[in-house]
């Protein structure tokens, strides 16, 4: 934490170039704006940020910091100790280096609104659940059951996107248990039509998510 704070102090003093950005994922959509360090303390910093970012800080109570000054391509995770959305002001503390895996994604991902059923079928076995988030190359499905024993990792994924029924050759990447059940992650290579349908849905969801965010500070 002290090493991180020293970099932030050097930025505040102007001895290092300020390329600091705040990063949150709001319904899987990255919200990232530049931040200005107003003051530094023994274990926290005070920053001003874009109002959209301030809204998300207030909702999530944590944020990632990105800068080329952090070593080995790492980011920094910290907690929001205080935020004033109206004045775009926040106090950040409890810093730790973090690997930001979401930045390595090859495609934009968005959360899916409402209940969208998805079924993965491999030979005689199947796995069904609620589609939670989607990109043009993958999807996560939530349900209350582990993947059937011995299910093949190559099969067909079926789901409806904006009224269009899609059948996608898919690969089961992993199944992970969490507090709510199981998360099953798949990758796929859509054909031209499926790519268009999914891309349109992602664009519309991004616009909708940003609109919802702006409505909170208008």
Image: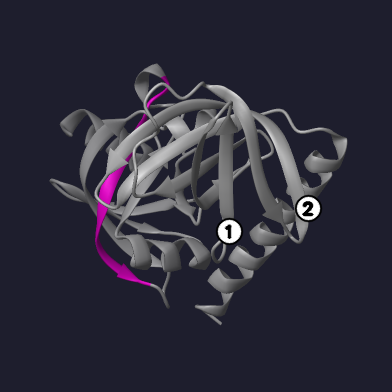
Residue 26 image label: none
**Relative to 1, residue 216 above or below:** below
Query: From this viewpoint, is residue 110 visible?
Result: no
Query: From this viewpoint, is residue 206 visible?
Result: yes
| Residue named by callout 2 | 200
Residue sticking out furthest to the bottom: 218
Where residue 65 sits, quadrant-wise, is: top left
**Residue 104 image point, x, y percent:** 52, 28
Q: Main secondary structure of the magenta part?
A: strand
Range of magenta residues: 73-84
Residue at position x 56%, y 82% in the image: 218
In the image, which is nearer the foreground, mark 2 or mark 1? 1
**Residue 99 image point, x, y percent:** 36, 28
Residue at position x 50%, y 78% in the image: 216
**Residue 160 image point, x, y percent:** 69, 54
Residue 101 belongs to magenta span: no
Residue at position x 32%, y 62% in the image: 90
How many residues crowd mark 1 within 10 Å: few (<14), some (14–19), many (20+)?
Answer: some
Residue sticking out furthest to the top: 72
**Relative to 184, residue 206 above or below:** below
Given residues 65 and 3, the one toward you in this image is 65
| Residue named by callout 1 | 116
Upstream in the sequence, badge 2 or badge 1?
Answer: 1
Residue sticking out furthest to the front: 124
**Relative to 216, residue 44 above or below:** above
> What element does badge 1 sit on?
loop
Quadrant location, the N terminus: top left
Q: Is residue 173 left or right of residue 145?
A: right
Q: Is residue 55 left or right of residue 167?
A: left
Tell me the CA gap for discs 2 and 1.
Answer: 16 Å
> What element does badge 2 sit on?
helix
**Residue 101 image point, x, y percent:** 43, 30
């Amino acid at each position: 934490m002290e090493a991180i704070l020293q970099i932030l102090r050097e930025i505040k003093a102007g001895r290092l170039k300020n390329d600091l950005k705040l990063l949150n994922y709001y319904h899987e959509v990255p919200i990232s704006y530049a931040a200005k360090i107003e003051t530094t303390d023994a274990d926290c910093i005070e920053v001003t940020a874009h109002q959209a970012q301030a809204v998300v800080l207030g909702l999530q109570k944590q944020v990632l910091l990105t800068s080329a000054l952090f070593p080995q391509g790492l980011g920094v995770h910290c907690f929001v100790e205080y935020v004033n959305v109206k004045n775009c002001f926040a106090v950040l503390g409890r810093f730790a280096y973090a690997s930001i895996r979401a930045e390595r994604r090859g495609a934009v991902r968005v959360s899916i609104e409402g209940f969208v059923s998805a079924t993965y079928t491999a030979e005689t076995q199947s796995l069904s659940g609620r589609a939670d988030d989607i990109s043009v190359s993958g999807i996560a499905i939530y349900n209350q059951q582990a993947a059937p024993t011995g299910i093949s990792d190559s099969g067909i994924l079926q789901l409806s996107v904006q009224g269009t029924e899609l059948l996608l050759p898919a690969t089961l990447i992993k199944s992970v248990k969490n507090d709510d059940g199981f998360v099953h992650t798949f990758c796929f290579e859509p054909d031209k039509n499926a790519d268009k349908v999914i891309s349109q849905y992602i664009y519309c969801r991004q616009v909708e998510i940003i609109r919802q965010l702006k409505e909170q500070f208008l």
